[in-house]
Amino acid sequence: MTRTSKKKNMGCCEAGQASADMACCKVDAVIAIDERGQIVLPKDVREKAKIKAGDKFAVVSCECAGKVGVIALIKTDAFEDTVKGMLSPLTQGAHSRIRNGGE
């Protein structure tokens, strides 16, 4: 018999399921977009993320069934490492095939 937690709708952070190397996502703030399409990140969020004026971000959107449901801001320095990590296995495999004559 499988037991289920009574704590429903709880993120990995609160449920104690996140390991030290696992990302933990939660709602830090609810913000509004002004008439010019701009947002303001609350000061406590900026401080927590060590965001300062001039920092650059990649805007990443996730689409499902033709609708964007998630928009994430990723610091470009972190984004570069993420992309390299994702592409490294692919490029290594491609380089290996090229060296072996396309096999």
Image: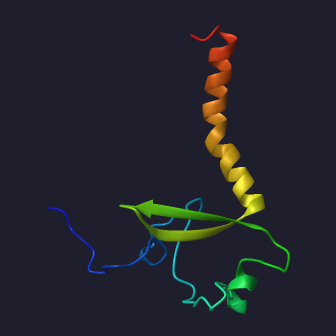
Residue 33, horizontal then vertical, whole percent: 60, 88
Percent from the top left, x then y, of residue 37? 64, 84
- Tell me residue 7's x, y (percent): 31, 81
Q: Quadrant of the C terminus?
A: top right
In this rendering, the answer to whether 50 lies above or below 19 is below
Decide if residue 48 is on the left or right side of residue 30.
Answer: right
The colour style of the image is: rainbow
Q: Which sits in the foreground, 35 or 23?
A: 35
Residue 97 in sight in this render? yes
Furthest residue to the right?
A: 54
Q: Quadrant for residue 10, please give it.
A: bottom left
The one nearer the camera, 3 or 7, is 7
Residue 19 at least partly seen: no
The number of numbered badges drawn on the structure is: 0
Q: What residue is drawn where x is 78% and y is 59%?
A: 77
Give x and y (percent) for residue 48: 71, 82
Q: Is residue 47 left or right of residue 94?
A: right
Position of 93 compared to 15: left or right?
Answer: right
Identify the residue at image location x=73%, y=91%: 43
66 or 74, which lies in front?
66
Name, please, the residue furthest toward the top: 101
In the current view of this chain or complex, which residue is farthest to the left? Answer: 1
> What residue appears at the point 66 percent right and 31 percent down from the top-left corner?
91
In the picture shown, does residue 55 fall above or below 48?
Answer: above
In the rendered view, does 55 fall on the left or right side of 34? right
Q: At 64% from the left edge and 40% from the top edge, which residue is drawn?
A: 87
Judge whether 16 appears above or below 44 on screen.
above
Quarter-of-image position of residue 96: top right
- Work out which quarter of the rendered image holds the N terminus and state it: bottom left
Q: Quadrant of residue 20?
A: bottom right
